[in-house]
Image: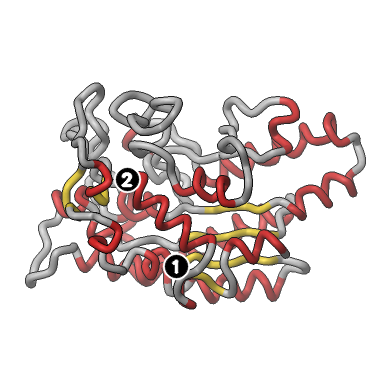
Amino acid sequence: MAKSNYPPYGIDYPDGPTGRFSNGRNTPDFLAQFLGFDTPIPPFASARGSKILRGVNYASGEAGIREETGFHVGDRISLNRQLLNHKTTISQFSLLLGRNVGAIKDYLNKCLYIVNIGVNDYIANYFLPQYYSTSLVYTPDQFAAILIQQYSQQLRTLYSYGARKIAIFGLGRLGCLPQELAMYPPTNGSSCVEPINNAVQLFNNRLKPMIDDLNSDLLDAKFIYINITSISSGDPSAIGIKVVNAPCCIVSTTFAKGFCVRGKVPCNNRKEYMFYDNIHDTEIVSFVTATRAYNATLPVDAYPTDISNLALQ
């Protein structure tokens, strides 16, 4: 059920609905644009032949670091399965680059990897106790530690496949999502669900040390951390955002909760909304996120460097 290949998703995207959870382009689209790509990176499902040499997108709705994350909405491609799909892509390289293992390794060493995952391990796992037992078994600190441990191993697997330049995106303030506000009304005068934000911050706090460990342990590894909490903490009105706590589209309250209802007309002032549905950013927010991830505005936006510098290394 975690699909967005129908209107009103893609209303501002040249090709219409494509599976992007947005009214238009998303953060990877803008990053590809900044890096000089003429067209978006194709998804794994349709990437064929020489197209895979340009890059492949393995993203999947509701996917998580943990295997069970998102099971309540049906099938999804977890990070472990995405890694297997990447291994399949690499196996196809031999047909394009010859069976020269060294040439394939050199090619992968030059590639830039964007890894943005973990949101669903909280909003489609830990904070859905009606479906998942994780919050009953683990304290927020224990859960963050276990997530980081598994994530680190998955990133080491990615490295073992030949990846060297890898940008890791942190998580934003998930307690401010309209979906979480609808489920857990904020208290103590806060405009967000602070227990969720606090739990997520325990995960974010472990990302920089994880980056340091990976760069220290793995030869020639160049991992960087993109601080989404920092990037999203500015005044939204500075970029014209007026609505920060409600979705632009009409969202479902039954099956795919929080996603846009198929065929319903969304708001017409989309550049004034932070969220398109109850969970995902509008195109304008994705543009700002990608811009600051690519060229850090503040020193805390990226560590130890930003994506533009990583691409040149």
Residue 16 falls in image quadrant: top left
Q: Please tell me which residue lies in front, 247 or 13.
A: 13
Say what amino acid the circle numbered 2 marks: Thr
Q: Is residue 8 visible?
A: yes
Residue 21 falls in image quadrant: top left
Q: Within 10 angstroms of label 2, few (less than 14), some, or many (20 or more) residues?
A: many
Using residue 308 as the reference point, say whether residue 174 is left or right of it: left
Find residue 230 and report its horizontal and vertical position in percent: 38, 70
Q: Please tell me which residue lies in front, 38 or 76.
A: 38
Residue for point 18% across, 63% down: 192
Q: Within 10 angstroms of label 1, few (less than 14), some, or many (20 or more) residues?
A: many
Residue for point 69% across, 75% down: 216
Q: Which one is earlier in the sequence, the residue at label 2 or at label 1? A: 1
The image shows residue 80, relative to residue 19, as above or below, that is below
Q: Quick one: SS at disc 2?
A: loop
Residue for point 54% across, 76% down: 209
Q: Please tell me which residue lies in front, 280 or 254.
A: 280
Classify the position of the C terminus by image quarter: bottom right
Q: Which mark is residue 227?
A: 1
Find residue 97 and report its horizontal and vertical position in percent: 86, 36
Viewer-nearest of labels 2 and 1?
2
Say what amino acid the circle numbered 1 marks: Asn
Residue for point 37% across, 71% down: 202
Q: Please tell me which residue lies in front, 13 or 191.
A: 13
Q: Which mark is residue 282?
A: 2
Q: Is residue 138 visible?
A: no
Find residue 179 and report its horizontal and vertical position in percent: 21, 48
Using residue 54 as the reference point, say whether residue 186 is left or right of it: left
Q: Quick one: SS at disc 1?
A: loop
